[in-house]
Amino acid sequence: MTPAIKKLQKHHIPYTLHHYDHDPQTQSYGLEAIQKLGFAPERVFKTLVVKTTDNRFIVGIVPVIATLNLKAIASVVGCKKATMADKTLIQSVSGYVVGGVSPLGQKKRLETVIDTSAFTHKTICVSAGKRGLDVELSALDLKALCSAYSADIAT
């Protein structure tokens, strides 16, 4: 059981777990999840970690089929610029390995921004905290649990 699942259970949030066999040779964790789970691509979201010019780590949650707009996320959190966080730092900052970063149950809760497209779906899927495991839940529940902002951060 991952910290993300424990957090959902602790707060009595309805969710559905989806397991799939992760291929260690995969180049895109998100596209693998879409293919193996069979969900509409716009309902599967990736959790990306960025670093701001003022040295904060921020989580951006965008559809797997989209790209994170770094200028937009920087603007939302009130800084000049954001860049993708170094992959070697992500595990120490979030507590999760790349490809299994969940917006829930992080080592230290990071500021989080969810793309507004998430709220057009009854449920979305995000990583449950390890490769090959996604959790389906309402975007509103995710926003509440993460104390997240919502903004147009995907292109």
Image: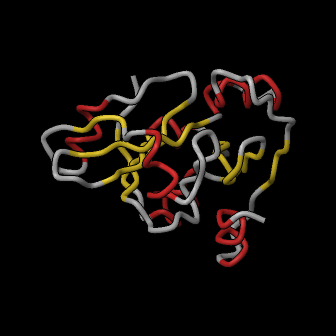
Outermost residue toward the left in this view? 80
Question: Is 63 rendered above or below residue 135?
Answer: above
Question: How has the structure been colored for display?
Answer: secondary structure
Q: Residue at x 29, y 35 (%)?
A: 83
Give the side of residue 89 with respect to residue 25, left or right: left
Quadrant of the frame with the C terminus? top left
Q: Position of residue 39 (x, y in %)?
A: 76, 29
Give the side of residue 60 with respect to residue 80, left or right: right
Question: Is 23 rendered above or below residue 141?
Answer: above
Give the side of residue 130 with respect to residue 120, left or right: right
- Between 38 and 111, the one lying in front of the other is 111
Q: Position of residue 19 (x, y in %)?
A: 85, 44
Outermost residue toward the bottom in this view? 10
Q: How many labels were placed on the picture? A: 0
Q: Position of residue 126 (x, y in %)?
A: 64, 45
- Between 53 and 6, the one lying in front of the other is 53
Outermost residue toward the front in this view? 88
- Between 42 and 104, the one lying in front of the other is 104
Q: Position of residue 100 (x, y in %)?
A: 64, 45
Q: Residue at x 37, y 41 (%)?
A: 85
Q: Residue at x 63, y 24 (%)?
A: 28
Q: Residue at x 78, y 65 (%)?
A: 1
